[in-house]
Amino acid sequence: MTNSGQPGSPDGDPPSLLRAPDDDAWMRHALKEAIAAYEEGEVPVGCVIVKDGRVIGRGYNQREKLHDPTAHAEMIALTAAAEHLQSWRLEDCTLFVTLEPCPMCAGAIVNARVKRVVYGADDPKAGACGSLFNVVQDARLNHRAELSCGVLADDAAALLKTFFRERRQNTAREGTGS
């Protein structure tokens, strides 16, 4: 089935605000992962990958913990889902992530052949699903994903804002010797 010409279609149209019936529920799972990152002092981004109504991969940012610049929520979830399926091809899977994927993660999503990407908050500084680039729907690549954005965006953005506000406050306190 193609949705050519529809928002969020693989021919590169802007991301869709249309949602599938379960998108909010699955995004709440991704938000739980983001909270786990927050509790560990990591940038609070969470991701789940769903196939046939089941979570088959999950992850949250762990760059600080693992000392790994590639340890983004999406990368960890993609690896877990591939391990679960015993295949790098994640066809017929939907990836839910609280923040718009960066270029690295968007490239991995394309390489994994993820069918659909649903994200919460836009990332105007590094977003590669419509904000700066639209890697997941670039017609020059061998795979394009369906795309929906803005799902529970306020919740995802609020968690990120709280994290960075607290981080700035802690930095300011450390700078004053308090």
Image (cartoon, grey):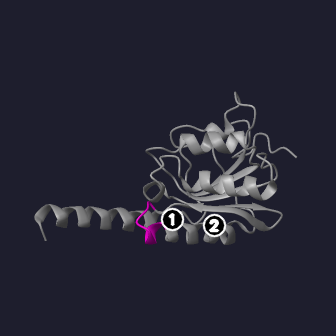
**Residue 97 occupies quadrant:** bottom right
| Residue 126: % across, % down | 47, 44
Name the residue at 64% across, 47% down.
Answer: 15
Whether residue 129 appears in this view of the structure is no
Left or right: residue 110 versus residue 157 is right
Residue type marked 2: Met
Whether residue 71 appears in this view of the structure is yes
Q: Residue furthest right?
A: 1
* Tag 1 secondary structure: helix
- Quadrant of the image containing the C terminus: bottom left
- Which residue carries the number 2 mark? 27
Along the line of sight, the residue nearer the viewer: 3 or 145 = 145
Left or right: residue 140 versus residue 167 is right
- Which residue carries the number 1 mark? 156
**12 inside magenta stretch:** no
Query: Which is more N-terminal, label 2 or label 1?
Result: 2
Residue type marked 1: Ala
Left or right: residue 165 versus residue 20 is left
In magenta, the rendered stretch is: 37-43
Q: How would you rate the neighbour count of disc 2 (Cα within 10 Å): few for under 14, some for 14-19, many for 20 or more?
A: many
* Tag 2 secondary structure: helix
| Residue 173: % across, % down | 18, 67
| Residue 151: % across, % down | 61, 62
Left or right: residue 28 versus residue 87 is left
- Label 1–label 2 contact, CB within 8 A: yes
Along the line of sight, the residue nearer the viewer: 146 or 101 = 101
